[in-house]
Image (cartoon, rainbow, N blue to C red):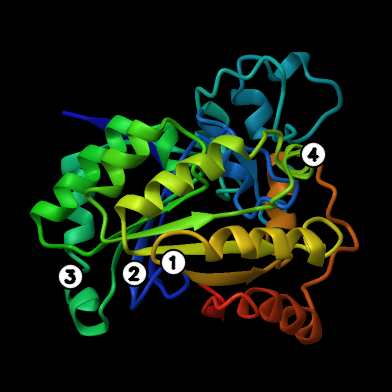
Amino acid sequence: MESGTIFSIQRYSTQDGPGIRTTVFLKGCPLHCAWCHNPESISPRREIVVLETRCVGCGQCREACPFGAAVPSTGPLPPRIDACTLCGACADACPTGARQLIGRTVTVDELALQLARDRVFFEDSGGGVTISGGEPLAQPRFLVALLEACRARGLHTALDTAGFGRWEDLRDAARLTDLVLYDLKAFDSERHRRLTGVSNGLILDNLRLLAGEHRRVWIRVPLVPGFNDDLDDLARMAEFVSRLPHPPLVNLLPFHRTALLKFARLGLDHALDGVATPSAAALARVREVFANVGLSVKVGG
């Protein structure tokens, strides 16, 4: 039985495709976007998070940890220590639930059974299941098996991907998917590398191939002021998208600051201090860039 690692199931989502959806977030991503909204998705391994507002400083996590005595200071352990083996002893010992393990292994059958229970919401709203991440292509066998199980149960499916993976894996998943949500972070290759850690050559190549095979593709463009909102670069992106077969709908996704707390809980640094949500005027300018080449544009997913 195929199994995979997920970190969250979000029900009643209205931002991951049409209708009311249940979104499954897979763990593991080869990109390291500076503005990542799900930093807990990047590592393929389980991780410890600390909810500081729940922590009472009792130190029971330190006592339970096999390596706690060697960590400097007293009181609660930080989210990350070098010797951590993710055994979960600290989370089990925490009396308030302040320490949590993020990431769990599930089989396709047990997950598909959970998803099918939301069928009534899907049928009433025209919704379905969205597989997101992380990057779902990082777990290709699990992804395909899960999509097959959803299709066998008659569930509408959407795949949310940045397209950074083998074309064969994307092709196989897309053939089982009613809708592909395809993320484009930046168009210039060097800018993309600075912002995400990888070039976008593979991403653009895969999108060309995908658009030739799949008629239902939506492009999703995160807009992060000071990072990827350069209008010239966005104009080049818009021109590229407009020349694809069956030009897709474009979703503009304004940056929001909710992820900053996630970085802190994971003990990770970020470069987002001072970055604000794009203004209505800024969104209107970007919308015009895509509309000027004949593309349908929507703010939100």
Query: Mark 2 or 4 closer to N-term?
Result: 2
Residue that carries the numbered disc 4 in the rendered image: 194
Residue 230, image x, y percentages: 82, 62
For badge 1, the amino acid type reads Asp
Task: Give the distance between the C-alpha atoms of the residues marked 1 and 4, in whole angstroms.
Answer: 26 Å
Residue 180, image x, y percentages: 38, 57
User: Left or right: where does residue 99 sit relative to residue 268?
Assistant: left
Residue that carries the numbered disc 3 in the rendered image: 119
Helix, strand or loop for disc 1: loop
Helix, strand or loop for disc 4: helix
Q: Is residue 177 above or below residue 199?
A: below
Q: Are marks 1 and 2 in contact (CB under 8 Å)?
A: yes
Residue that carries the numbered disc 1 in the rendered image: 16
Task: Give the distance between the C-alpha atoms of the residues marked 3 and 4, in whole angstroms.
Answer: 41 Å
Q: Residues within 10 Å of mark 2 (few under 14, many from 20)?
A: many
Residue that carries the numbered disc 2 in the rendered image: 21
Query: Mark 1 or 4 closer to N-term?
Result: 1
For badge 3, the amino acid type reads Arg
